Image (spheres, grey):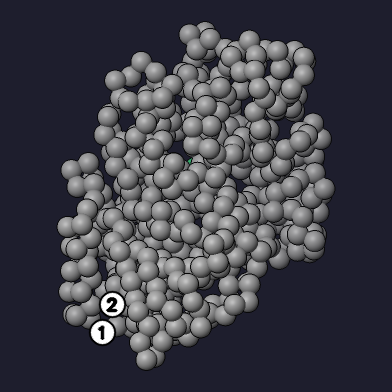
Amino acid sequence: MIDLALGVLMLVAATMASAQPVEAHLIVTQDPAGPRIEPTVYGHFVEHAGTGVYGGLWVGPESNIPNTRGWRNDVVQALKRVGVPVMRWPGGCFADDYDWRDGIGDPAQRPVRRNRWWGGLESNRVGTHEFMDFAEQLGSEVYLSGNMGSMPPRAAAQWLDYMTADDTSALAQERRRNGRDKPWNVKYFGVGNESFGCGGNMSPEHQADVHNQYATFLWSTTRVASGDGEGDDNRVEVLMKRSAKQMDALTLHYYSVPDNWTKHGDATGFDAGAWARTLKAALGIEQRITALSTIMDKHDPAKRVALYIDEWGTWYDTPAGASSLWQQNSLRDALVAAVSFNVFHAHTDRVKMANIAQMVNVLQAMALTDGPRMVLTPTYHAFDLYRPFKGATPLKATLRAPAFSTGDVELPTVQVSAARAADGKLVLALVNLHPDRPARVTTNLTGAAKGQVLTAAAMDAHNTFQQPQAVVPAPFSAKPGSQGLVLELPPKSIVVVGMQAMH
Ligand code: AHR
């Protein structure tokens, strides 16, 4: 580990010697820029797709792969380290074709169904009891994604009763017979998923009415309406107008794709153009958040209804032979995560939850597995670096940094987020988006800064089972000089530092 950190530092020094740094200036003030960063902004999404559940998270209690009641110990341990505040389950598109009754009772008696959206067969071996055990192992809140597309409202209401009733009603008794005495806490309940598409292809007006009908029967939980995922402001307008009273949150789905939805682009082996297009797409989430917030402000000026970005991340082409939605994860993905976090921090008045898609082996994953092997991705390390931001209060930070162009794509060289952490420390996250040039960031700060840097020599550097530490954080520190604190950022890097004194 120490050798590796040294290697990264040598690489940083070598690159910085060869290219002129971009000059930037940062001013951080004590003024809060919004309410606190909810830890749930660092949430996750688990869908029954590919090897996202079976193999990636669940191996079954009889497996030789070390597990606790079926859940992989290696993955659970890694996830516990970064902390999982909330998990959305069981989909995605899968959720609107899911009958919760298929996943309770004797596993041997559970029906095998076709996985309509992601292919293969669904054994239902992982159902409500198993998933809630996983959540308890992680210490995570749960966000259940209810079926509004193909089941009646009574099914959703009964699922909630089955899980949360603490009386002698038939559903609570059935849960007890199935091995769980104490009710579970279901903090969040999704009323459908992508109702504009795989959740039923509903018009906005129809969705709003159906939403109201379902939400009427869902009590004692945060009712989450499926919102936008295709750049449709009108749907958000209609939902806010007709259904705001029947929801506590509305969702945005946002995927960053380098090319287009027919040919997404490759996860590795890409050029500087694809690097720039992916990061440009990732930064574009801010426009959608602003657009949705503007509509929400009009109908809900008190900001009672939260905005949940309950699916976000990169989406590349699945390599031939890989399981559904599998993709490699490189340094580029870590930067996508970091710039997204920085955007979320700038919109804490509405953005109260975000769930990266998805946890393991699917899209922008935290870990990849193959049989007994597991490797942590650069995205995992980005989550690790940003831990001090959970629960922190964002501060006003003004950055003067030049833009740079790759073809016709223009990007800011540096992007930043500053916050006052729960322990009173100032935390700074800086992303250098330039693939080749370091950045020298002068600041109005006078304290010493200490933290970590995530970078690598290649844009598509990634961890493999053979080389699990190709992209790992290294220590980073900077001492104030006569000009105040100056932060030297390597090309294509994320730096997160904490400091005691501010000015
Ligand atoms: O995350 C993969 C899929 O993307 C989800 O199932 C769906 O909601 C979205 O289109």
Residue in the image at 29% along x and 42% along y:
375
| Residue, far bottom | 482
Disc 2 residue type (three-letter): Arg
Which label is found at residue 437? 2
Residue closest to the eye, 145 or 207: 145
Examine the rendered structure and indicate whether residue 74 appears above or below residue 455: above
Tell me, yes or no, if residue 375 can be seen here: yes
Element under label 2?
A: loop
To which quarter of the image does residue 166 belong? top right
Residue closest to the eye, 320 or 500: 500
Element under label 1?
A: loop
Residue 341 appears at what percent x and percent y? 50, 60
Disc 1 residue type (three-letter): Gln
Residue closest to the eye, 494 or 155: 494
Residue 151 appears at what percent x and percent y? 68, 25
To which quarter of the image does residue 65 belong? top left
Label 1 and label 2: CA atoms lie apart by 6 Å
Crowd class of label 2 (few under 14; some 14 to 19; many from 20; radius 10 Å): many
Q: Are marks 1 and 2 in contact (CB under 8 Å)?
A: yes
